[in-house]
Structure formats: structure tokens, C-alpha cells
Image (tube, rainbow, N blue to C red):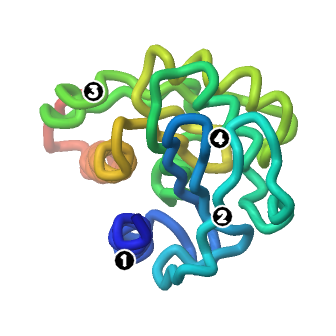
Amino acid sequence: MLEEFQKFGRDLFLAGLNSSHSGNLSVRFGDRILITRRGAMLGHLGEGDLVETGLVKNDSHIILASTEIRVHRAIYKNTAALAIVHAHPVHAIALSLIEDEIIPVDSEGSYLLHKIPVLSAEHTIGSQELEQKLPLLLTEYKIVMVRGHGSFAVGSVLEEAYQWTSSLENICRIIYLTRTIREELKVKGSIKYKDW
């Protein structure tokens, strides 16, 4: 299992979906959860960076678990998810600050995700509000953006949750580039553009 965490933690970091010490990964097996520790470097995970604890009850070393442990637990208790990827994709975070939902404009993005809701919360990190609201959205959507914070993606395995995270950031890059090009064309005035 460590190798899976290392593989996708490194991919998240190398793809720029997390900074050096941000984000977290977890998997559920029965009534147990394996989650990255608080402040772990996802790009360089070792054995000491994974914390095993109960889905309901805390183990003695729970203090080491990610600050998002309660949110992960709530998602597992209320959805069919067996894996969660929480990331901080830059373009997606920027877009979440000005949109209430992210609608892909590209074919693959539309096919894979259709729409990504943006959840507003007063407290965006490990809060009771996220515990209550995220699971409801994640029963309907594969990935949700928390405004100004980051994404939570679910899957049956880490690879699937990673795919939604990677796809979300590609969708947001395409939206950003499309809007940028459109504005440049507006400025030039003489070139027609497609209005998305």
C-alpha cells in the first residue's frame, strides 16, 4: 500500500497539484483508514508518513493524522468511496474564487466530469461544515472544489481519485487559456471569437 501512496503522492506533486507539504491521501479498508500524516510531503512519502486509524474510533497515534481526518471519515461513512485525494490545484482554486460551479468547455472534460460544484464554507480546513456538506455532494459528483482551498475527489482506488483531480486541473487550465485568448481577441477587435 505504501507504494500506491508514494506513486500518486509523487504524481500530485510533480503535476503541480500540491505544494511541497499540502494535500492528503487516504484509503478505506473495512472499518479502518490509512491516511497521510499531518504535514507530510506527498512527493516524498515514507512509511512514517502513513497513519492507520479507525473509521469511527481513534487510535493512540491519531494526533499524527492529517488535519482533514474528520472530513475523510465523514466522506467514507456517507459515500461508497474507498479512496480520497485532497489536492490544491492552482488553476482550480483560482477559478473557485470567482465561480459557483466549474463547467468544462473541452470535450474530454465534459465527458469525464460534466460539472464540478464549488462549495463555500466559513472554515475551509477540517471543519464540521465540510464534514456535513462534502459527503452530500460527493454522492452525486466525483470531485468537489472547496472555494479558495482545494479539491476532494473520491474513487474506488487512489488512481481513480487522482484521475478526477488531474482532469479537474486540466479543465481549469483550458478555461483559463480560453478566457485569456478571448480577451486578447476582444482587444484586437477585428478577429472574431467563439463566445463560450
- The nearer-to-camera label among 4 and 1 is 4
| Residues packed near mark 2 inside 10 Å, few (<14), some (14 to 19) or many (20 plus) | many
First in sequence: mark 3 vs mark 4: 4
Quadrant placement of the C terminus: top left
* Quadrant position of residue 114: top left
| Residue under pointer 1 | 14
- The nearer-to-camera label among 3 and 2 is 2
Q: How many angstroms separate mark 4 from mark 1 (CA)?
A: 24 Å
| Residues packed near mark 1 inside 10 Å, few (<14), some (14 to 19) or many (20 plus) | some
Q: Amino acid at mark 4?
A: His
Residue 53: image x %, image y %? 70, 52
Secondary structure, mark 4, is: helix
Q: Does residue 50 appear anywhere in the picture?
A: yes
User: Mark 2 and 1 residues: CB-CB less than 8 Å, in contact?
Assistant: no
Q: How many angstroms separate mark 2 from mark 1 (CA)?
A: 23 Å
Q: Amino acid at mark 1?
A: Leu
First in sequence: mark 4 vs mark 2: 2
Q: Residue at x 49, y 17 (%)?
A: 139
Image position of 1 (left or right of 191):
right
Q: Amino acid at mark 3?
A: Trp
Residue 97: image x %, image y %? 63, 41
Q: How many angstroms separate mark 3 from mark 1 (CA)?
A: 31 Å
- The nearer-to-camera label among 3 and 1 is 1
Q: Amino acid at mark 2?
A: Val
Q: Residue at x 58, y 25 (%)?
A: 100
| Residue under pointer 3 | 196
- The nearer-to-camera label among 3 and 4 is 4
Q: Which mark is residue 72?
A: 4
Residue 81: image x %, image y %? 46, 31
| Residue under pointer 2 | 51
